[in-house]
Amino acid sequence: MNKQSEETSDDALSEEQRLQLLTRAGQRNRLVIFVLAGVLGSLMLLSAGLNLYGVLGGGDDSRVVALERQVARLEKQLAVQQVALSNQEELLASQQSRQLTGLFERAEHPDSIAQVSKVLQAQETDYQAVLQGLKVGMADLANMLPGSRSWLNLYNEPIDRALLNSRQRSEEIQAWAEQAAQAQP
């Protein structure tokens, strides 16, 4: 039993020592927490004070002056850019007008007019031949079918007008070609 009583007394002492150690550690921890809370609180107050000072106008004069200078500089750059833009627009407009003038100049050459008039004359001649063939074919058909004289007279008038218009166009094309040939140096 002796051994048990010695173990219990060692345990009791060590429990007391542990309790004292825990108490001291708790006090130390509380002290560290209070110090940290104080440091953090003072940092927060300092930060809030600096922010408040910055918001309420501390040092704004220098920033405002710097911003005014920057605005003035940007306005000068804008004026220079606007002048450059107007110069570019004028240059572009003059270039476009020169290009359009070159495009719309008369480019009639007597040789090309003669060639075009030949083509147009040939087309009118072919058109007249087709209309004459149509007229002959309609007359033949009317002779084959009894009682078809009324529609033949009805269709002959528009065909005759188309032939007359084609002959007038041929004469105008011929006059155009002769006029171009006379204007040739």
Image: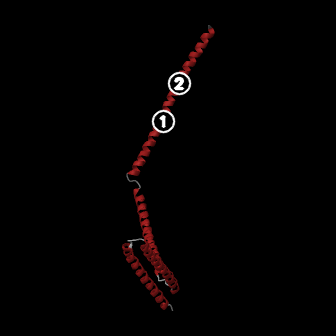
- Residue 8 lies, with reference to residue 153, above or below; the image says above
Residue 131 locus on image (x, y percent) = 45, 77
Towards the viewer: 2 or 56: 56
Measure how far apart labels 2 and 1 are at the Cα level. Answer: 20 Å
Residue 120 locus on image (x, y percent) = 48, 81
Residue 133 locus on image (x, y percent) = 47, 77
Towards the viewer: 127 or 118: 127
- Residue 35 marker: 1
Residue 127 locus on image (x, y percent) = 47, 78
Q: Amino acid at mark 1?
A: Val
Residue at screen point 45% across, 37% down? 38
Q: Which residue is mark 2?
A: 22
Residue 145 occupies which quadrant of the picture?
Answer: bottom left
Residues tagged 2 and 1 counted as in contact (Cβ below 8 A): no
Residue at screen point 40% across, 50% down? 53
Residue 42 occupies which quadrant of the picture?
Answer: top left
**Farthest-out residue, right:** 3
Local secondary structure at mark 2: helix
Q: Amino acid at mark 2?
A: Leu
- Quadrant placement of the N terminus: top right
